[in-house]
Amino acid sequence: MSDSIIIIPTYNEKENIELIIRRVLGLAEGFDVVIIDDGSPDGTASIVKHLQETYPDRLFLVEREGKQGLGTAYICGFKWALARGYSFVFEMDADFSHNPNDLPLLYAACKDEGADVAIGSRYCNGVNVVNWPLGRILMSYFASVYVRFVTGMSVHDTTAGFVAYRREVLETIDLDHIHFKGYAFQIEMKFTAYKYGFALREAPIIFVNRVLGVSKMNTSIFGEALLGVIQLKWWSFFRSYKR
């Protein structure tokens, strides 16, 4: 068993799922993978089950009924990973917007360089986004600027979804009381870790917009993030972050 697990949530990712699994499991570091599938009607889970015959001890599948949201998928994956003793737990998209070859960078940041949370960052070294419309780049970039200003975190890519956690972080955060399910989930996890005093580090990556399949992003998700940041800051005044 590996000390590290990659959580990949899926909903209708049949075009990408086999390729991303084979790429991740082909890395020298020997990561394990768990797919959290929200009842994809396109047969994503069936493809994963077929691949489990090839990777019986490294590829796992959790099937959920209906589309329950990205945040709840990751919470499900976090609990699954903690119950099985993994030391490092990763978030990653299925659509190759996160390059599997960057996983060792995040792993090294946590295992060897003292990070408790390692963030694959689009914005810590300029703007490294490929194939996004300019409007979406600006919206995402300035959303992170706004979050930094409100929360006080010195994280350039606060909405990043390519993240590695030491298990101690996930054990400390009360996962049952993470409020947000969409885009703001990523902010809430980083902000909560920051308030507990964990070390957050960014590693520069190049984010590439998906080529295959359909994006799940929409403007309402951004709206949740903008309003959610104010809520997070307000709630933080009434919480204790002792560990």
Image: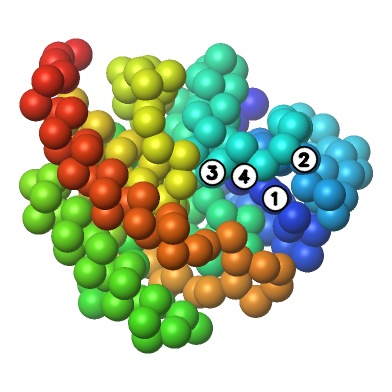
**Marked residue nearer the N-terminal end (3 or 2):** 2
Return the residue at label 4.
9
* Label 2 crowd bin: few (<14), some (14–19), many (20+), radius 10 Å: some
Question: Picture coordinates of residue 174 (x, y %)?
Answer: 35, 18
Return the residue at label 1.
11
Return the residue at label 3.
70
* Circle 2 SS class: loop
Return the residue at label 2.
39
**Marked residue nearer the N-terminal end (1 or 3):** 1
- Tell me which amino acid carries mark 3: Leu
Contact check, label 2 and label 1, Cβ < 8 Å: yes
* Circle 4 SS class: strand
CA gap, disc 4 and disc 3: 7 Å
Contact check, label 4 and label 3, Cβ < 8 Å: yes
Contact check, label 1 and label 3, Cβ < 8 Å: no
- Of residue 189 and residue 59, the one placed in the foreground of this image is 189
CA gap, disc 3 and disc 2: 13 Å
Image disc number at residue 223: none
Contact check, label 1 and label 4, Cβ < 8 Å: yes
- Tell me which amino acid carries mark 1: Tyr
